Amino acid sequence: MLKVKNGDIDKMGLLYERYHRQLFRFLFNMTRQKELSEDMVQNIFLRMLKYPEGFMGFGEFKMWMYHIARNVVYDHFRKVKRTPAHSDVKDYEEKIEGGQITDAQIEKDEELKMLESAMGKLSDENRELLILCRYQELKYNEIAKILNTTEGAIKVRVYRALSQLKNNYLKIEK
């Protein structure tokens, strides 16, 4: 990113190739909307290209990228009411009738839907913490840098978020 900041714009392509999938997974887990997440990835890299001076060079690029991504997500949800992601039920039913999906896959899909529903009932902050920690596999100290807090505070918040997720899941399961 320092090279981009100094005018070597071609290096942005390398950064994009290295991080766009990881960034997409984070955004998709936050929004549950494929097209929106793809658009947000593009928006984030455009912001990085437009405002390279925001990267000071003394921190990790990945932490700066996630900070921008968080801002893009929250900007979007401030402007637009949160809309649930929709799935194509008819297509899913056709796969079941065609024998393309086994009972084990159906059961796994149901569990994932319950987990997704339980995640959806978490506050935005708790959902974001669990996505960063469990899905993106960031370390507590990395999350602390992104959220501008201490590692100890992140450990406590993740523990509480997991407890809330467990309670939400158990309520849905009943």
Image: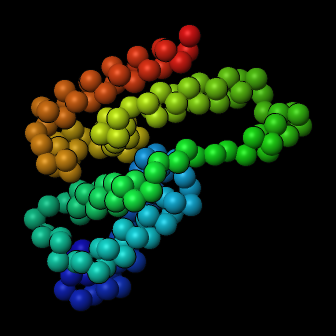
Q: Nearer the viewer, residue 139 or 120?
A: 120
Q: Residue 38, image x and y in percent?
A: 51, 63
Relative to 34, residue 119 above or below: above
Picture quadrant of residue 158: top left
> In the current view of this chain or complex, which residue is farthest to the bottom?
7
Q: Look at the image and tell me in which quarter the N terminus lies.
A: bottom left
Query: Which quarter of the rendering shows the C terminus?
Result: top right
Q: Nearer the viewer, residue 169 or 131?
A: 169
Q: Residue 64: x and y, percent?
A: 23, 61
Which residue is located at x 37 percent, y 45 percent?
136
The percent position of residue 106, horizontal first and vertical second, equals: 71, 27
Task: From this view, report whether residue 39 is shown above or below residue 122.
Answer: below
Quarter assignment of residue 62: bottom left
Q: Out of 164 and 111, give the one closest to the viewer.
A: 164
Residue 133 visible at all: no
Q: Is residue 15 left or right of residue 80?
A: left
Q: Is residue 36 visible?
A: yes
Question: Residue at 17% across / 77% down in the picture?
Answer: 53
